[in-house]
Amino acid sequence: MTAHIDAPRSAALPTGARPPAPRTRSRTRLRALGTAALFLSPMLVLYGVYYLYSFVFLGQMSTKSVDLSFTGATDLGWRNFHLVLTDQLFWRAIGNNLLFAGAQIAVALTLGFFLAVSLASGVRARKFFYLAFLLPSLIPMSLFATVFGQMLQTNGGAINQSLRTVGLGALAQDWTGNTGSAYAAVLILLTYLIGLPIMYYTSDLTTANTAVLEAAMIDGANTPQMYRLILFPMLRGTHKTVILSLLLGSFRWFEVVYFSTGSQPAGRTGITGTYIYDQMFPSIGGGQIGYASAAALVVLVIAIAVSAVNVLVQRRR
C-alpha cells in the first residue's frame, strides 16, 4: 500500500504585499492574550482564591490534632504524615485507585474503542446505543451508584431476588461481604461508565482521514486489520486523552465506591476518597481533621506525580 503526501505549499501573497513583520505579529498576539486574560480574570480570581485557601487550610490542619469543632488544636509537626504513610489501609486505597483505573483504561481502549468505531460506522439503532452508553456518564454518579448498590443488597436486592425467582437461589449471596464479588461489582460498575471514552473516540473519528481507509480496503485489508493496524494507531492522540482522564478521574470516584459497596468488606474496596471520608467521619469516635488533611495532601502529591509520569511517558512515545 502506497501513500502520496503532497508537499506543503506556502500561501500566495498578493503582488507587492509583504509578510507581516515579526513585531506586528508579536503585538497582535499580545493584544489577543490581553483580551483573553481580561475576560477570564473574574473566573481565574475566583478559582485562585478558592484553591489557594483550600491548600493553605489543608497545610495548616495537616500538622495539627483537631476534630470537627476546630477547637483545642494541638501541633503535631509531621506526625500525621508519618501515620498516613505507614498505614496499610491507605496504601491499599492507593492500590485500589490504580487497579480500578487500570481496569477502566483497558476496557476503554478495547471495548470503548470498538463500540465507538462500530457506532460511527452507521449501525442500526445507533441513537439508542449512544443513549445507553452515554446516559450513565451524564446522570449524577451518586444516583447511579446508589441504584446499583441497592441491587447488590443481600436481602431485597434485585440480583438476589431475580436469582431466587428463576430457581437459582443457591447462587444468591452477600455480594459486598465477599472480597471477590465486591471487587467485581465495582469493576462492572466502572465498565458501564465508558460513555466518556466513547464520546472522545466518536469526536475524533469524525475528523479521521477516510482516504487511508479507502486505500486499505482497495489493498484487501479486512475489518480486524483495519481496526488494529489503521484506526487504532490513527487515534493515538485520543488514547492519551482517555488514559490521562481516567487515571486522574480514579481519584474522584468517591461516589462510585461509597454508594455501591461502601468500601466493604472491611474497607478492602475503599479508595483514597472513601479513606479520607472515613477519617473525617468515623463510625466510632470523633473525626480526625488533621490526619484527614495530611492524607489529602499526600493523595494530591501522588495524583500530580502519576499524571506527570504519564505525560512524560506519552511524550517519549
Image (cartoon, grey):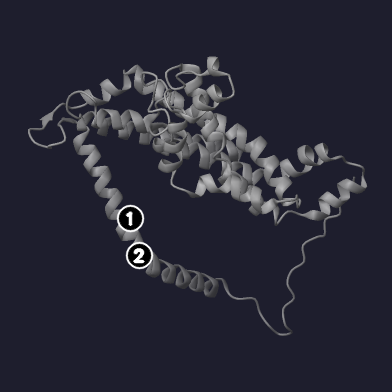
For label 1, the residue is 47
Q: Please, what is the three-letter code of the amino acid marked with disc 2?
A: Ser
Marking on residue 293: none
* Quadrant holding the N terminus: top right
Query: x and y percent of residue 177 in the render?
Result: 42, 18
Q: Nearer the viewer, mark 1 or mark 2?
A: 1
Q: Earlier in the sequence, mark 1 or mark 2?
A: 2
Disc 1 residue crowd, few under 14, some 14–19, many 20+, Cα 10 Å: few
Disc 2 residue crowd, few under 14, some 14–19, many 20+, Cα 10 Å: few
Q: Nearer the viewer, residue 6 or 62?
A: 62
**Which residue corresponds to the image point at 55% horizontal and 23% vertical from the top-left?**
163
For label 2, the residue is 41
Circles 1 and 2: CB distance less than 8 Å?
Answer: no
Q: Nearer the viewer, residue 63 or 259?
A: 259
Q: Is residue 77 visible?
A: yes
Query: x and y percent of residue 50 in the render?
Result: 28, 52
Query: x and y percent of residue 154 in the render?
Result: 43, 23
Quarter occupied by residue 167: top right
